[in-house]
Amino acid sequence: MSSNANIPSNYVSDVQPILYSYWRSSCSWRVRIAMNLKEIPYDIKPISLIKSGGEQHCNEYREVNPMEQVPALQIDGHTLIESVAIMHYLEETRPQRPLLPQDVHKRAKVREIVEIICSGIQPLQNLIVLIHVGEEKKKEWAQHWITRGFRAVEKALSTSAGKYCVGDEISMADCCLVPQVFNARRFHVDLRPYPIILRIDRELESNPAFRAAHPSNQPDCPPELPNK
Amino acid sequence: MSSNANIPSNYVSDVQPILYSYWRSSCSWRVRIAMNLKEIPYDIKPISLIKSGGEQHCNEYREVNPMEQVPALQIDGHTLIESVAIMHYLEETRPQRPLLPQDVHKRAKVREIVEIICSGIQPLQNLIVLIHVGEEKKKEWAQHWITRGFRAVEKALSTSAGKYCVGDEISMADCCLVPQVFNARRFHVDLRPYPIILRIDRELESNPAFRAAHPSNQPDCPPELPNK
């Protein structure tokens, strides 16, 4: 490995991590999956993105995450934000059940799919962006950007996918794909042109780590969940 | 290092890489800086984002990058897309002049700043998004998202910055920050509330790797550059 992370043996704290999470937030969901896959026990502190105009905007939470969004993860005496950075931190400190393949080109492919979703799709159909777009146009707007991104994801998967996004091992790409498919359904995107995306999503549906991370299994999920 | 990238000794190809780039694209610019810092020679193939409605949308280039955007990097017999994935690939195959610190918490901080910029700011003030927002509203839209993101970046830097974004070594975070500051100026964002961002930007202005990567020094930069 050419990277040179320096991990003292006493690095990992015994204190149970706290994940600031919202049940339907796809970025929180990515981290929940990664934590579950690595079997890291954690407590959830729900932050409602809708109650009182959004608890993520209150002064107390702004100190935790100045981007005023979820997730944030308190772990090993530090507070981490940004889901992709968090997943890499978990990978570098908890090597069990790797979320990146060994081969550098496969690693690049995982990160490519991660970035298409996390930079190219999700930020554009984020709740706060849709508020700015306005009620009237938001469905069309979200569909446009999800469709554009899924075309690229499907194309990437056509050469990389095995059982999962890249080969036959679950990776960060899968942690990002499943929540994005859920969002696509929320916005009634026609998913028929993306058979590989759909196949992988189905494959992961019954995986216990993914199932436990699903919005419908979160403590802050309202009892009458529309997309359950 | 707990990650487990597998890099065969004959991995790095002798064939000179080709970077598909547009002079003013901030995502291309990040990769140009990283390539220059690591002293990797490369050829530039300019893709005009404005000529003929955007060369990135033509069939030939769509095969290179199905997201229809720059950059794309042909290197070691592969075509890589997504600037953050490319920077990680360079880091893992060309360890000279590291772009990530050794300490895992500092690495997390670098990636946090990278993601705030690359997921939280740039995608929202991207050319194709602004076309959708419309001429009338685009300046206010871009200012809103850049301001929101820069508040979070400045806050992160208040505990992480030394001479550069994280400590005294240049990292991926700096590769992302400088192009974003340029964009902020294009959209006339008031940068006075961000003294650390401004200081680091000034510090890097004269760095040869950053200077060579600047839009004004690109082969496809028009002779009469407004922001030169």
Image (cartoon, coloured by chain):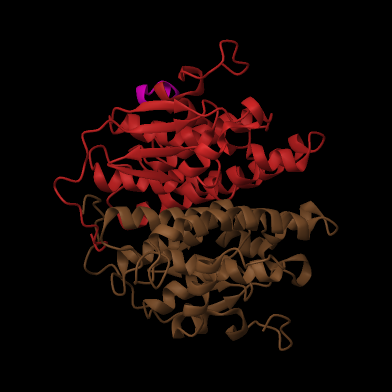
Chain colours: A brown, B red
The kind of secondary structure the magenta stretch mainly shows is: helix
| Picture quadrant of residue A173 | bottom left
Q: What stretch is highlighted in magenta?
A: B205-211
Camera sees residue A16: no
- Depth order, front residue of B60/B207: B60
Residue B68 placement (x, y as % from top left): 56, 42
- Residue reaching furthest to the front: B59
Looking at the picture, tell me which residue is in the foreground, B199 or A1. A1
Q: In which quarter of the image is the C terminus of chain B?
A: top right
Q: Looking at the image, which residue is at 43% across and 27% down?
A: B45
Foreground residue, B73 or B94?
B73
- Tell me the residue at 78%/38% (across/down): B134
Q: Look at the picture and state if A106 lies above or below A215.
A: above
For residue B191, what is the image quadrant? top right
| Relative side of B222 to B84, left or right | right
Q: x%, y% of residue B208?
A: 36, 21
Q: Is residue B21 above or below residue A19?
A: above
Q: Where is residue B77 in the image (x, y as percent from the top left)?
A: 29, 42
- Occupied quadrant, residue A66: bottom right
Task: Give the side of residue A180 with respect to residue B200, left or right.
Answer: right
